[in-house]
Each structure stands twice: as structure tokens, then as C-alpha cells.
Image (cartoon, grey):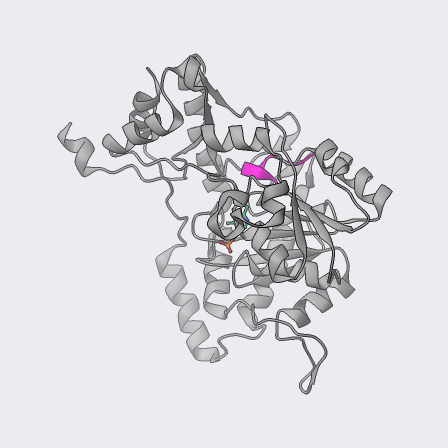
Amino acid sequence: MADEKENLVTVTSPLLPDLGQFSELLEDIWQRKMLTNNGHYHRQLETALADYLKVPYLSLFTNGTLPLMTALQTLGLRRGEVITTPFSFVATTHSIIWNGLTPVFVDVDPVSGNIDPAAAEAAVTTATVAIMPVHVYGTPCDTAALETLAAKHGLKIIYDAAHAFGVEVNGRSVLESGDMSTLSFHATKVYNTVEGGALICRSAGMKQRTDCLRNFGFIGEASVEEVGLNSKMDEIRAAYGLLNLKRVDAAIAARRAVADAYRAALKDVPGIRFLEDIPGVRHNYSYFPVFVDEKEYGMSRDGLFEKMQRHHVLARRYFYPLIPDFRCYRDTPAAKAAHVPVARRLADSVLCLPIYHDLKEEDIARVVACVVR
Ligand SMILES: *Cc1c(COP(=O)(O)O)cnc(C)c1O
């Protein structure tokens, strides 16, 4: 089809604020002449996000990787092992390494792709100091089991909640779980500030420490107590973020409609599995992964991926490869010790279909036409 070629269906499309309103805020920033360092819009966005997300303490960051790195530092974890998942974005493991800690990869649940609490428990040693799970695709982890495990062995839990913006379980934010949670506001996420992120803290003291670490470790003007980083968000992106927050509920509702359309169209396709909504959970529809059973479907995941590309429909193998399979980790003891067959199967079978607020009906139909056989 000629028009298929001209109209590429992309994997994602960023949520953008109203341009007129954004120019007004830019004019205001020009007037104020304060561009960063906890300015007017930065303070407003921290309050507005804490409100929206129903969490008491939130610190803004300049991306979603730095809060992961800083969380370990805020909690004072300097040596030891951190139990984590191989089925995530590479930043999760990077943050452990940057802190001089040792990642220990354990297997995941075959349905959700989230860390398997039993596998995590089996990996606890005297050197274990923390667990770093991920709410993969925004599906909440088994937080109750993980918290029981952490309490029993005196471990900290830092949730990588990069996919879980606005996700709630029985009316409570999933970000309330564990010792700390981190968010990413990257352009490809449900809610974005172009680049950005946040660290959710349990107490005012933890937020104070986090805010100090995010600004080189400065306390006051002339005292540096710790080796912090510069990971502050600036005024321009904070203003952008304030405007995008007004649009995020409508964006999530539109994503839900896309997910519903995919589920209705794909429910009887043999060899294609997708995630269902969980009762009591407010989902954010951040991704729409399908898992391809090659035998039953009659085509491999990569076969489908390439077929879609030929039809100018982009999908994403997310997460693939597994983190321990990346060149930078492949030869490390942690990667060699990883026995993670379930994660491997998911990584080899997953394909995330296009899902975003402004995905058109005819494009949904084109995606479906590629998958239905
Ligand atoms: C996006 C993402 C990150 C990193 O966020 P950035 O804002 O890109 O630094 C970390 N973990 C997961 C699971 C992610 O999807």
C-alpha cells in the first residue's frame, strides 16, 4: 500500500504541553532570570507531582538514572550485594555498579516479568544489603512478599518505578512501597519533562539528604559533606512538566483505549499473549507488550518484528537483550552466575506494540493487521 509507506507508525510519541501556555511560562522565566537551583517552577512542580502521585516527599532530578544512583547513596549503601532483575533497562544495573556495589541477578515471574520474591530470597547472602526490583511495564511487583523478605534479612528496597507513573493499588500509590522509589520523565515515558526524573522519599530527613546529594553534596553555601552529583532539574523543564501534568490523565485514558482495542483484536490469536488489567490496580498503559510463542504462532518474535518493519510499523523488543548479556556485563562474575531462564524466555519472546495518547484508529488497525495471521 502506497500510503502505508508514507505513514510510519512509530513506537512512541511524546506527550507535549500546550505551546502557547509554554511560551507564557518561558516569558515569565525570562523575567525572573532564575534558570535553575530550586527556582519558582521547580518548587511548584515538586509540590504538584507529590500531590498528583499521593506521596509525601519527592525530589526532582534531571533524568531517571540519577535518582537510582542517588537512592543507594541516600540510604548509605557503600559495599555489598544488591539483588536485582536482569529483565530491565540497563540503567537499573548501572546505578548499582556506579555505587561500587555488586549486582546479583535473579529470575522473574513468567507472567508479569517482575522479580520473583522466592528467587530473591534464595539469593540472599551475608553480603546482601538491598533489593532493587522494577515494576516492569507498570505492573506492581509483589511488594508484600518483597517487604517481608527485606524485613526478615534487614535489607533496603529501592523500586525502579520508571514505568509506574500514577500506578495505584486499591487507591494507594505503588510509590509508597519500599524505602525509596524512582521515576523517569524521559520523552518516551507516559509523563515526560523532555528528560527528567524523581526520587520518592519516606521522610523529610531523607529528602533533605537527597536534595543535598543532588547538588554536589552542598549543605548551605560553604560546606560540602559528601561526594554528591549535579543532577538538578532546571526551570525550563520544570515549567514544561507543570503543563504536561495537566494533560497526563487524558493521555492515560487515551492509552487505555488503545490497550482495549489491541486486547479485543488479539484475544483469539494463537501464540500471542498479552497482559490483562489487574482488579484494584490503576494502570497507566505505559507499554503494550505481547509475548510470541513461536511454535503456536507459527513465526518467531523477530520474524514478526521484521514483518512489521516491512509494513512501516515500528515495534520495540523491550527488554532485549537481558542486562547481563550486554557486552559491558557479559564477562562479569554477576552475569556468569545469573541463572535466569524465565527472564531469558521473556526477553526472547517480547514485542512492545506502539501505544500512545495520539495513536490513530487507522494505525491501530495497521498494527493489528500485522499481528493477526
Ligand atoms: C527509562 C528507564 C530508566 C532510566 O530513565 P532515564 O530517564 O532515561 O535516565 C530506568 N529504568 C527503567 C526501567 C526505565 O525504563
The verdict on residue 350 being magenta is: no
Task: Name the residue rendered at 46%, 38% in the picture.
Answer: 318
Task: Pick the residue in front: 126 or 231.
Answer: 126
Q: Where is residue 253 in the image (x, y as percent from the top left)?
A: 48, 35
Which quadrant, please, contains the C terminus? Answer: top left
- 221 or 32, nearer to the observer: 221
Which stretch appears magenta?
Answer: 135-142
Residue 335 sits in quarter: top right
> Is residue 180 placed above or below 151 in the rendered structure?
below
Q: Is residue 94 above or below residue 149?
A: below
| Residue lying furthest right | 152
> x and y percent of residue 74 in the render?
72, 63
Position in image of residue 302 (x %, y %) = 36, 29
Q: Does the magenta stretch include residue 139?
A: yes
Residue 24, picture quadrant: bottom left
Residue 267: image quadrant is top left
Q: Which residue lies furthest to the left in this view?
A: 2
Residue nearer the viewer, 161 or 86? 86
Q: In which quarter of the image is the N terminus?
A: top left
> Would residue 363 be found to the left or right of residue 301 on screen?
left
Image height of 78 relative to 218, above or below: above
Residue 24 appears in the rendering: yes
Depth order, front residue of 110/214:
110
Q: Residue at x 47, y 64 (%)?
A: 237
Q: Could you tell me which residue is drawn at 46 percent across and 27 percent down? A: 349
| Percent position of residue 212, x then y | 68, 72
Residue 166 visible in the picture: no
Q: Most extreme residue toward the bottom, as rendered?
A: 222
